[in-house]
Image (cartoon, helix red, strand yellow):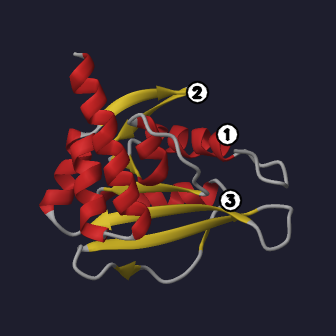
């Protein structure tokens, strides 16, 4: 997924994950890239991470060091107790940017999802990815049209894997 200005989302993803790992952050990949890690590839334009609240201050420093700017004031999703911190990295193309969404949970339920995450090899790094069941759980909480489609696809992949085992 290379944008028209030549910045490759996956190369930038490797940089972000390597920095998270180097800083010892407790995080897990969620969102479209996590759906892909669980066997259903789909287009996405951003990176989404669930982050332990104790690591927020360190994450702000990591994002700044990588050239990201905080896009807006953090806001909490209605009914989920997840606070969204959005970061943008300007790129040469006017009006374009790489987007990283960091979701900071207020509940132990979400923090435990980070603890249950599994490390997957990706490029030159290993990335902590939320489990398929937890990803479905997060998407059920949100319930947007893309989330409903992702749930159907994740459940179909899970069904195929169970049939093959």
Is any part of residue 154 visible from this angle? yes
Q: Which of the numbered marks, if any, corresponds to residue 123?
A: 2
Residue position for label 1: 11
Please, which residue is most extreme toward the top here? Answer: 165
Q: CA distance from mark 3 to mark 1?
A: 14 Å
Confirm or deny contact between disc 1 and disc 2 (CB under 8 A): yes
Q: Is residue 35 shown above or below 124?
A: below
Q: Is residue 91 shown above or below 159?
A: below
- Residue for point 28% across, 82% down: 78
Is any part of residue 56 visible from this angle? no
Q: Which of the numbered marks, if any, corresponds to residue 67?
A: 3
Of 93 and 144, nearer the camera is 144
Q: Quadrant of residue 79?
A: bottom left
Sequence-earlier tag: 1 or 2: 1
Q: Quadrant of residue 146?
A: bottom left
Q: Quadrant of residue 87?
A: bottom right
Give the secondary structure at mark 3. Answer: loop
């Amino acid at each position: 997924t290379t944008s028209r200005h030549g910045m490759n989302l996956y190369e930038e993803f490797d940089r972000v994950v390597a920095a998270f790992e180097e800083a010892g952050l407790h995080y897990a990949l969620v969102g479209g890239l996590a759906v892909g890690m669980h066997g259903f590839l789909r287009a996405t334009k951003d990176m989404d991470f669930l982050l332990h609240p104790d690591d927020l201050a360190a994450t702000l420093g990591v994002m700044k060091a990588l050239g990201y700017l905080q896009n807006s004031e953090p806001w909490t999703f209605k009914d989920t107790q997840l606070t969204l911190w959005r970061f943008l990295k300007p790129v040469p193309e006017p009006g374009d940017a790489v987007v990283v969404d960091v979701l900071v949970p207020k509940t132990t339920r979400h923090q435990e999802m980070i603890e249950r995450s599994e490390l997957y090899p990706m490029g030159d790094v290993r990335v902590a990815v939320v489990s398929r069941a937890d990803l479905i759980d997060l998407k059920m909480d949100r319930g947007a049209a893309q989330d409903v489609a992702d749930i159907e696809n994740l459940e179909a992949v899970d069904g195929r894997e169970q049939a093959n085992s």
